[in-house]
Amino acid sequence: MAITDRSTAPSAHSISKTAPDRPPPRGPEPYDGTSPFPRNESADRHRVPPWQLAGTAVVVAFPFLALATAIGLLWGSAVGPADLILAAALYSFTGLGVTVGFHRGLTHGSFTPNRPLKIAMAIAGSMSFQGDVIAWVATHRRHHAFTDRPGDPHSPFRFGTSLGGELHGLVHAHVGWLFTSDTTPPSRYAPDILADPDLRAVSRAFPALCVLSLALPFGLGWAVSGRLHGALTALVWAGLLRVALLQHVTWSVNSLCHMIGSRPFRTRRFDRATNLWPLALLSFGESWHNLHHSDPTCARHGVDRGQIDLSATVIRLLERVGQIHHVHWPLEDRLATRRQA
């Protein structure tokens, strides 16, 4: 039997007197797939600290700063092959740290790595300047929990499906969401990552790893060329521009891969994830985004003929040398049940 505190419970008379004909309060209207998302009032009450806005602005703007620096450094001269080789190597190392490590491994559990590899992948992903490992995993899991619905931190449909709304949403999904105060609590979305002492240590080391990500090409450029000019060109091409390119490729998966491309597999209602083949190589297979949202724990995203998925190739190699196990490879029967009719 329920016990009621009579000192605070309103009487039937008082209820009928204060609101005789008013209907009971209603919850938020269900999302219809076309309207702008309702405002997040709890986020509105928390202003983003100025230092955080400044830091984000630097990260977003430095592709343009890097380009200006490159023009100044290389005016009248050509970039050397060592710069391009170093840029490609660090792009692959940090990019696979994000796609194989942060994304398929730690976020979705597509495989189980051994401890040294887990730490190495978390370090490599952190050197991409895309946030510390705990925040990255939490934000991406929240994206999957609310894909293209209210609660998604970077849906391009946040402002509705009109032309103006989608253009605004495209900017928001690509980079605008980084400037909002709509934070994602790791305690809710990534408790397993928070509980891992190795990953907590890598998360704390994130600022130092960002410095290392730029110091490494500078030092290697100096070692190869023996000159300050060689160190600076390596810093520009294998440091600043490499980081900028990888960031914008990753952000394009958030934005373009929910607006442009094919959808051969069924996803949840309102989930508009697509396959966008032009980004496949640069994203290491992440732009086969439709299958990923249809079957998030699958270790391979490009499952059809001709779909190059370099992340899955790396996972296969690591499995063969015994560095990872319990890999969730695609099964034909499972794929068949998810294909669009």
Image: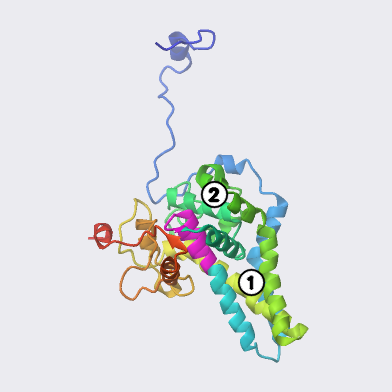
**Which x, y percent locates residue 69?**
71, 78
What's the residue type where badge 1 is placed?
Answer: Pro
Q: Is 338 displayed left or right of 61 in the figure?
A: left
The secondary structure type at the circle numbered 2 is helix
**Which x, y percent locates residue 268?**
34, 51
Residue sitting at 38 percent across and 54 percent down?
A: 271
Front-lying residue, 277 or 283: 283
Q: Is residue 290 above or below residue 47?
A: below
Front-lying residue, 305 or 146: 305
Q: Which circle, 1 or 2, is nearer the viewer? A: 2
Q: Is residue 78 magenta?
A: no
The secondary structure type at the circle numbered 1 is helix
Which residue in the protein does label 2 denote? 193
Q: Is residue 2 above or below residue 70?
A: above
**Which x, y percent locates residue 122?**
57, 60
For this orientation, the residue located farthest to the front is 322
Q: Which residues are magenta?
A: 96-112
Residue 146 in view: no
Residue 254 in view: yes
Front-lying residue, 136 or 269: 136
Mark 1 or mark 2, earlier in chain: 1
Residue sitting at 67 percent across and 57 percent down?
A: 205
Residue sitting at 44 percent across and 53 percent down?
A: 160
Q: Which quarter of the rendering shows the N terminus?
A: top left
Which residue in the protein does label 1 denote? 63
What's the residue type where badge 2 is placed?
Answer: Ile
Across the whole image, how many numbered discs are drawn on residues? 2
